[in-house]
Amino acid sequence: MQDRLQELQALLYKEIPITRHFHLTAGAYNERMLRLDAPLAENVNHAGTAFGGSLSALLTLAGWSMIWFMLQELDLQGEIIIQDSSCRYLTPVKKDFSAYCYRPTNEQLGRFEKMLRTHQKGRLELKAEIIEGDTLAVSFVGRYVVLLEEK
């Protein structure tokens, strides 16, 4: 799995250059969630807390990365696009932070795979969050579209 995380991080650095600037690292992936990490020092705002744009970007990228992993597992390739999202900033983030994107249910995944294989495109809504200590700091919901590449 570590090889896949390194592959993801290299892909993000190459295809989405801003990820290098805020020092994103692909932290973990398993059957329940994906974690991306970022240091506060490179993402700090005037108040000494994490910049809202960095928080939103990391959450958006966590969803994008979850879809990338799922496509790898389905042996499919496609363009991943964020269609719609919302963030709720509940408390300031004062430390290095991580975005956790949660894997959809098997039922959602089945519908998503069926759409992809039938129509060469699919839509999926994902949830992610940033937690500081025991407190939910930022919640995120994003809808992603995947357009499969011609084989």
Image (spheres, grey):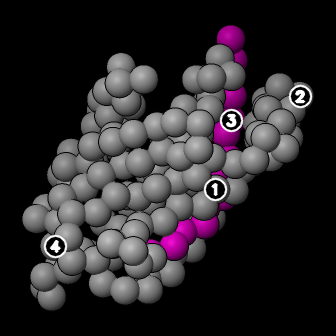
Pick the residue in front: 140 or 20: 140
Q: Position of residue 86 (x, y in %)?
A: 57, 73
Residue type at the position of mark 1: Leu
Which of the two marks, 4 or 2, is nearer to us in this view? 4
The image's mark for residue 44 is: 4
Label 3 belongs to which residue? 147
Label 1 belongs to which residue? 126
Labels 1 and 3 touching (C-beta < 8 A): no
First in sequence: mark 4 vs mark 2: 4
- Chief secondary structure of the magenta portion: strand
Which of the two marks, 2 or 1, is nearer to us in this view? 1
Residue 22, quarter of picture: bottom left
Q: Quadrant of the N terminus?
A: top left
Report helix, strand or loop for mark 3: strand
Q: Residue furthest top?
A: 151
State whether residue 147 is above or below residue 100: above
Label 4: how many Cα within 10 Å (few below 14, some 14–19, many 20+) = some
